Structure formats: C-alpha cells, structure tokens
Image (tube, rainbow, N blue to C red):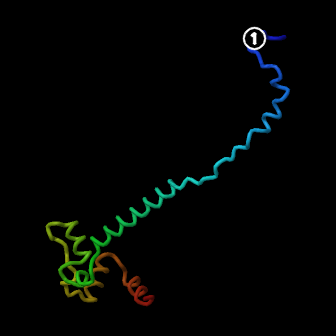
Amino acid sequence: MTKNTDIRVPDGYFSDLQERLLTIPEAKSPRRVHLAPYFAYAASIAVLVLAGTFILRRTAVTPEEESSSEWSYLSYLAQSLDPDGATYDWRDSSLEDEDIVDYLVNDGVTLEELVSYEENH
C-alpha cells in the first residue's frame, strides 16, 4: 500500500546523508550550575538572622533591669494577665513552713505523703 504524495526528496539526498551528519560538530551541553536559587536561600536566611537579632536585642532584659525590684518577667506577665493589679506578690509575704504544711493539709494531702516527700527530698 503506497501513498501518493507531492513531497519530493532531492536526488542523492539519502546516499550521502551519513557523511553530512558526521560533519556536524557535537553540541556541547553547558554544565553551568545555576546559583541564583542558592543566593536567594542564603539571602533569606541572612534576613531572618538579622531580623531575629534585631528583635532579640530590642526586647532583651539587661542584668540591671532583671535584678531591679521594679521589673521582672514574672511581674510583667502577671500584670499583663491581670491589669487591675489584683495579683498576689509572694515576695512581700512572710510565708512560714507551717503555713505551707497547713495549706497542703487543707488541700487534701495526707501526713504520710508529706513525710514521704520529706524523706525523699
């Protein structure tokens, strides 16, 4: 079964096709590494580190602030949770061991549990 087409091949085209193909130089594929994504990753990490450092330095507590009685993280946290100032400041109390034992007994802790705790610690 043959198809009749109007496409014609020049005379001698296929006879020297192999020789003509061998004369074409080999195309060398470029072995370039695309560095743009790596630069983008490095830049994003650098931005994150710089932003984190900036934020930490702005919010860091100096030793003077930490030791002062005016400010501590716990008091700041308590004030933010209870803006009316109704929190209990344990530093102002004179809490005795007897008060702790009374609290634990009233809370349902047995004397045996207290003695066992005392012996183990």
Q: Is residue 66 above or below residue 83?
A: below
Residue 78 appears at what percent x and percent y?
Answer: 23, 71
Q: Is residue 5 left or right of residue 78?
A: right
Q: Is residue 2 above or below residue 34?
A: above
> In the rendered image, which residue does mark 1 sit on?
5
Q: Residue at x 30, y 75 (%)?
A: 107
Q: Residue at x 19, y 72 (%)?
A: 87
In the figure, residue 99 lies in which quadrant? Answer: bottom left
Residue 27 appears at what percent x and percent y?
Answer: 70, 43
Q: Is residue 20 left or right of residue 57?
A: right
Crowding around mark 1 (Cα neighbors within 10 Å: few <14, some 14 to 19, many 20+) is few
In the figure, residue 4 lies in which quadrant? Answer: top right
Residue 31 appears at what percent x and percent y?
Answer: 64, 52
Observer-nearest residue: 62 or 84?
A: 62
Q: Residue at x 32, y 70 (%)?
A: 56
Kind of residue at disc 1: Thr
Q: Is residue 83 left or right of residue 37?
A: left
Q: Residue at x 14, y 67 (%)?
A: 84
Residue 89 appears at what percent x and percent y?
Answer: 20, 78
